[in-house]
Image: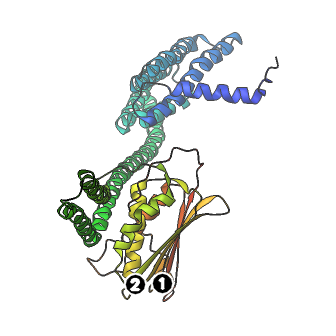
């Protein structure tokens, strides 16, 4: 049995480094920035805790450690070994406690070294204490560490300068050493203070923008849901007159079939009378089914339903919607529907698909105040997509208007005559289904909408569609 070849060395190294970074960042800290800082600080503490003792061991092995330096060496090594408890504190989620322990250990070692040798060795560690305290603990900690460093220098001066035989010379040395130290560290502290303040302000602004953006996204989602429902209600209102006419026809049919019982010949046989009554009841039942189908369509638009992509046979969906499309237009507009006999399967929200076609039809109706023709065609294209073409021969649109029709709230209608949201909702629906929608129009040449949706396979789970008659 063959086994896969081993990964190249550089890939194994990269994978190991990636695993190490994830482990270092896997600490119980709530703030993402603290987790990233924790990874860097752990590496830094591991480096200091290892290299400083090794460096002193190398000096001692070479005979470079004088008796005067032995006390400072011990203090410096202990301060370096304190880095390992600091790592332990960070791994337990006590980041600030670990930083405070590191700073205190370094300042203590610096104080001991200055007292015993009158020289402050390796001031990079003191600068590092300033930087870490300021970045992690804040500006207050930064200035506290600065004052503690000033106290360390003052103690060193008092221990080694004032006991001099000549007091005037001692004071002169102190007057030279302390101001120089104070000015150097004060400049460093001021620069760090300004940088830290700017970083924290930028971080606060970024967080505030993130919160505002999150709130805006929630508000936009809520507004979009409300707008879809408003579009449904608007479309339902536009269909009210046609629906009333349909119901009147249905009730007239039911009344007519019910009145058949009065026209049954009393002299006919019982079987003939039963057949006549059964026929009349069949007619009443069919009319009632038409009424129930129409009612369900109205409830579809009135009821708030979440968007749900389903596999829909769009040809049957258009057939089911055709009566409502005809009702959208007046008697002076001819509606012609043509679709391919090939199954037109696509993944889309069925209820919002109906709403989209009704909105486009409503716009076409407004563009044909004197009547005209509205065509609907659906077919499969050569690249195996479902294309739905909706065309009217109305007034059309200029190019400047056509380019903006899918913008939310854009409308050329008078105030109170439309929300300007129908086509924006249609664009969002088609995009969420992985399709495209485009419009071709010119003044006096009508408007054509082309909707292209990805076609799905015939063995997909197809939503059953009821076609009203």
- Work out whether 299 lies above or below 139: below
**Residue on which the image places disc 1:** 393
Q: Along the line of sight, which residue is nearer the eye, 320 or 52?
A: 320
Q: Along the line of sight, which residue is nearer the eye, 72 or 329?
A: 329
- Work out whether 29 lies above or below 216: above
Q: Along the line of sight, which residue is nearer the eye, 15 or 176?
A: 15
- x and y percentages locating residue 142 in the rendered image: 40, 36
* In contact (CB < 8 Å): disc 2 and disc 1: yes
Local SS, label 1: loop
Visible in this render: residue 121?
A: no
Q: Quadrant of the C terminus?
A: bottom left
Specify whether 86 is left or right of 457. Answer: left
- x and y percentages locating residue 357 in the rendered image: 42, 66
Q: Quadrant of the N terminus?
A: top right
- Work out whether 461 lies above or below 299: above
Specify whether 15 is left or right of 176. Answer: right
- x and y percentages locating residue 170 in the rendered image: 44, 28
Mark 2 or mark 1, which has the lower sequence index?
2
The answer to which quarter of the image holds residue 365 is bottom left
- x and y percentages locating residue 143 in the rendered image: 37, 36
Specify whether 5 is left or right of 47. Answer: right
Give the alpha-carbon distance from disc 2 to disc 1, as whole Å. Answer: 7 Å
**Residue on which the image places disc 2:** 368
């Amino acid at each position: 049995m063959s086994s896969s070849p081993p990964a190249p060395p550089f890939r194994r190294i990269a994978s190991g480094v990636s695993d190490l970074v994830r482990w270092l960042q896997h600490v119980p800290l709530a703030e993402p920035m603290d987790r990233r800082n924790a990874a860097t600080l752990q590496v830094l503490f591991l480096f200091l805790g290892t290299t400083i003792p090794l460096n002193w061991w190398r000096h001692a092995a070479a005979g470079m450690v004088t008796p005067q330096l032995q006390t400072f060496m011990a203090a410096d090594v202990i301060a370096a070994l304190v880095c390992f408890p600091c790592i332990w504190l960070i791994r337990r989620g006590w980041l600030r406690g670990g930083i405070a322990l590191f700073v205190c250990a370094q300042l203590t070692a610096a104080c001991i070294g200055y007292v015993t040798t009158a020289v402050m060795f390796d001031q990079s560690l003191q600068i590092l204490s300033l930087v870490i305290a300021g970045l992690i603990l804040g500006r207050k900690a930064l200035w506290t560490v600065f004052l503690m460093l000033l106290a360390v220098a003052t103690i060193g001066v008092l221990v080694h300068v004032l006991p001099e035989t000549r007091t005037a010379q001692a004071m002169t040395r102190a007057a030279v050493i302390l101001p120089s130290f104070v000015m150097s560290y004060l400049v460093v502290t001021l620069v760090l203070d300004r940088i830290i303040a700017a970083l924290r302000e930028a971080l606060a602004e970024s967080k505030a923008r993130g919160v505002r953006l999150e709130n805006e996204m929630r508000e936009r989602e809520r507004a979009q849901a409300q707008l879809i429902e408003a579009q449904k209600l608007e479309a339902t209102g536009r269909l009210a007159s046609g629906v009333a006419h349909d119901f009147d026809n249905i009730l007239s049919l039911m009344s007519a079939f019910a009145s058949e019982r009065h026209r049954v010949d009393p002299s006919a046989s019982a079987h003939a009378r039963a057949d006549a009554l059964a026929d009349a009841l069949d007619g009443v039942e069919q009319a009632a089914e038409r009424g129930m189908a129409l009612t369900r369509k109205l409830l579809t638009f009135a009821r708030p339903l979440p968007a749900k992509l389903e596999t829909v046979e769009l040809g049957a969906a258009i057939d089911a919607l055709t009566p409502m499309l005809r009702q959208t237009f007046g008697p002076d507009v001819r509606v012609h529907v043509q679709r391919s006999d090939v199954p037109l399967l696509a993944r889309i929200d069925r209820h919002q698909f109906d709403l989209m076609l009704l909105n486009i039809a409503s716009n076409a109706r407004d563009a044909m105040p004197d009547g005209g023709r509205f065509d609907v065609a659906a077919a499969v294209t050569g690249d195996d997509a479902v294309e739905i073409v909706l065309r009217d021969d109305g007034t059309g649109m200029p190019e400047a208007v056509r380019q903006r029709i899918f913008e939310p709230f854009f409308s050329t209608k008078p105030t109170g005559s439309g929300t300007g949201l129908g086509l924006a909702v249609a664009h969002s629906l088609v995009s969420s289904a992985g399709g495209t929608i485009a419009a071709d129009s010119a003044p006096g040449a009508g408007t054509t909408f082309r909707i292209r949706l990805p076609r799905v396979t015939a063995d997909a789970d197809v939503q059953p569609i009821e076609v009203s008659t």
